[in-house]
Amino acid sequence: MHTVVVGTSGVTASDVLAVARGGARIELSDQAVAALAASREIVDALAAKPDPVYGVSTGFGALATRHISPELRARLQRNIVRSHAAGMGPRVEREVVRALMFLRLKTVCSGRTGVRPEVAQTMADVLNAGITPVVHEYGSLGCSGDLAPLSHCALTLMGEGEAEGPDGSVRPAGELLAEHGIEPVELREKEGLALLNGTDGMLGMLIMALADLDVLYKSADVTAALTLEALLGTDKVLAPELHAIRPHPGQAASAANMLAVLKGSGLTGHHQGDAPRVQDAYSVRCAPQVAGAGRDTLAHARLVAERELAAAVDNPVVLPDGRVESNGNFHGAPVAYVLDFLAVAVADLGSIAERRTDRLLDKNRSHGLPPFLADDAGVDSGLMIAQYTQAALVSELKRLAVPASADSIPSSAMQEDHVSMGWSAARKLRTAVDNLARVIAIELYAAGRAVELREGLTPAPATRAVVEAAREAGVAGPGPDRHLAPDLAAAEAFVRDGRLVAAAETVTGPLN
């Protein structure tokens, strides 16, 4: 079992993925434990003073004006967790909750939050036991961070609410903790607040989306190349010297991928054949420009994610010089913006892929392919409705591209009067990523069939390897009409788990 050691800094995106998706175990470094103890001493000293300190001896948000006496402070910390665990709607996916909890633990271990070492260890123990708090879809405005989702996680640490056990069953959290020998935490000054204030949910979803989109952008380069072949297009537009004069790195990478996939093709360059054309359509010719712009957006989003991973987001925060200061670092705008940027790029990549698919199916634009790639057009409908499905997915992608971060709704008696909506941006991006995988799968299905219908012409070794691997994965080839949904599901799985890219790379080597 892979182990992730959490120190005061240095957590990576790979660590998040290992914990969220791979079930990696977590250990706290000695450095982290020492930093936790040191910052706790500062909080304890402030708690002993008569002067009110926000988050330590006061109420929260719009109620921060009340000074809380020592005998009520444990109750205050319990109450903030209970009252803020107010989410509604469907349950959030297990991997999202694990990422959320792990990223909050990462910030706690920075020594900037004033949380005791035993609370951090309990967080690690819950994750290691495979216990996943029940978190709901709605409840976060992305400021102050992901309050409601994090509150449901903190509730589990207290042995309250519901959680999912390692066997997948949902039960009272207290029962699950007891079965694994984990003592519920008794929160003290500042600890309830420290467990709730952070951009951890939206950051976790960003990191997972980046990992998924890395695969999908490579997949889109492969399917675009496969479509170019099937349409007897020219690969001359992919020449590196053409892309060097417009030096966007993503564009050059996509063009290089397509060129590598098409190397040795016997189908390219026939655009001057029976139906001469000077240029291929934009959806084919401009594939590297569109996918490349998306790749550059990914690079920017990755930079933001790395910066956020290096952050210690809490309010108030314990500074190295011993001060405890209020701040606004919990605001989710930096993460929310790139989540929305990615949704725009995803929608456009899906849109251009759908246009290529439609061209493959139209006998007036497919340069000799049968209508809808049908076996006996008229008797057979071929892939007509597969393209309908793809079009519906693309239409949904366009709706999901409407930015969440452009919205704000005031809350907390106007104390929190401008919010990021970053959680909402992350949730819709997850749906968009899922739909993009389906759109690419349908292009793969159509282009693979079209290449096989080009009798007497030999596809490139890489595209041939992709089509053969798809067939072995249960993605059927040309023939009479059949129940398409299982084929499309097999194609989606083939794209989503990286087998499409892996098949191409058996010939091309690693793609960009």
Image (tube, grey):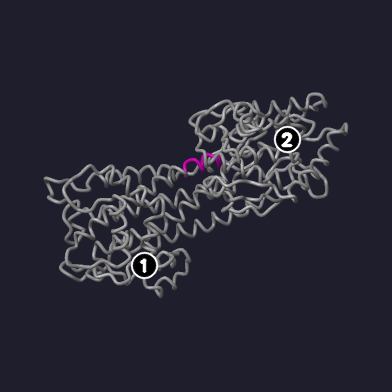
In the rendered structure, does residue 465 fall within the stretch colored magenta? no
Q: Are marks 1 and 2 in contact (CB under 8 Å)?
A: no
Q: Nearer the viewer, residue 150 or 487?
A: 487
The amino acid pointed to by label 2 is Glu
- Is 404 on the left or on the right of 375, as rendered? right
Task: Residue under label 1, please give it.
Answer: 507
The amino acid pointed to by label 1 is Val
Seen as rendered, the residue at the extreme bottom is 241
Which type of secondary structure does the marked residue at label 2 adopt?
Answer: helix
Q: Position of residue 78 (x, y in %)?
A: 70, 27
What's drawn in magenta, residue-wise? 421-429
Q: Position of residue 28 (x, y in %)?
A: 69, 47
- Is 217 on the left or on the right of 80, as rendered? left
Give residue 146's quadrant in the image. Answer: top right
Above or below for 427 versus 302: above
Q: Position of residue 411 (x, y in %)?
A: 62, 31
Q: Earlier in the sequence, mark 1 or mark 2?
A: 2
Above or below for 58 versus 35: above
- Is 76 on the left or on the right of 16, as rendered? right
Mark 1 neighbour density, 10 Å: few (under 14) some (14–19) many (20 or more): some
Mark 2 neighbour density, 10 Å: few (under 14) some (14–19) many (20 or more): many
In the rendered image, the quadrant that contains the C terminus is bottom left
Q: Position of residue 380 (x, y in %)?
A: 14, 46
- Is 375 on the left or on the right of 42, as rendered? left
Task: Residue under label 2, please give it.
Answer: 191
In the rendered structure, does residue 428 fall within the stretch colored magenta? yes
Which type of secondary structure does the marked residue at label 1 adopt?
Answer: helix
Q: Nearer the viewer, residue 402 or 195?
A: 195
